[in-house]
Image (cartoon, helix red, strand yellow):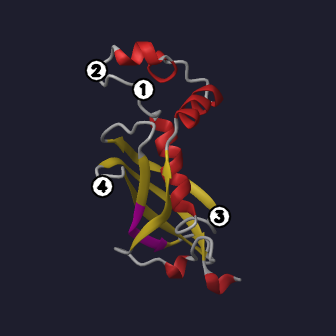
Amino acid sequence: MSFGRYYEEFETGAVYPHWPGRTITEHDNTWFALLTMNQHPLYIDEYYARQQPLGRRPAIDTLVFSLAVGMSVADTSGKTIANLGYESVVFERPLFPGDSLYAESEVLEKRESASKPDRGVVAIETRAYNQNRERVLVLRRSFLAPKKSSE
């Protein structure tokens, strides 16, 4: 199995579905809250969460973000020299423990590096969905991909 892509392997407009998906558990949510020191009661206090508008504990947004980015790495940035940044991150709807997360990435653009001929900049949009194909997250990021011809 290939891990990531070289600059030449990206095509603007190409869409890469990421597999497998990941079902979020209560355990994932609680451990992520503890690991990241997120002590908001919405994520760690079931009684409190039941009294809020969603009526239950949602998955922590940054957990969903982290999983979606992680899912994309094998198909996109696995060979990356450097991550250059996140242009935008939009959480469109909550995900809950018991839901499954799926993602796909589209190549928005690519350009050769102006200063180093052995690499290029790739920009992608990653879209994450729940098991009902309802979009939960959209993020845009760019990274520096090596050229295959430089190896």
Q: CA distance from mark 4 to mark 2?
A: 23 Å
Seen in the picture, residue 48 relative to 132 is either above or below; the reply is: above
Q: Earlier in the sequence, mark 4 or mark 2?
A: 2
Comparing 47 with 101, the one in front is 47
Secondary element type, mark 1: loop
Q: Closest to the observer: 141 or 58? A: 58
Distance Cα–Cα, label 4 vs label 1:
21 Å
Q: Which residue is mark 1?
A: 57
Amino acid carrying label 1: it is Arg
List the residue tagged with mark 4: 133
**Hey, what amino acid is under mark 3?**
Ile
Residue 100 horizontal/vertical position (percent): 43, 49
Determine which residue is flagged by label 3.
Answer: 81
Along the polypeptide, which appears first: circle 2 or circle 3? 2
- Label 3 and label 1: CA atoms lie apart by 37 Å
**Amino acid at the residue labelled 2:** Pro
Does the residue at mark 4 contact the one at mark 2 (Cβ under 8 Å)? Answer: no
Count neighbours of disc 2 (C-alpha within 10 A) and say few if under 14, some if 14 to 19, many if 20 or more: few
Evaluate whether residue 85 shows in this view.
Answer: no
Which residue is situated farthest in the front direction here? 98
Whether 105 is among the magenta residues is yes
Residue 4, located in which quarter of the rendered image? bottom right
Residue 81: in magenta span: no
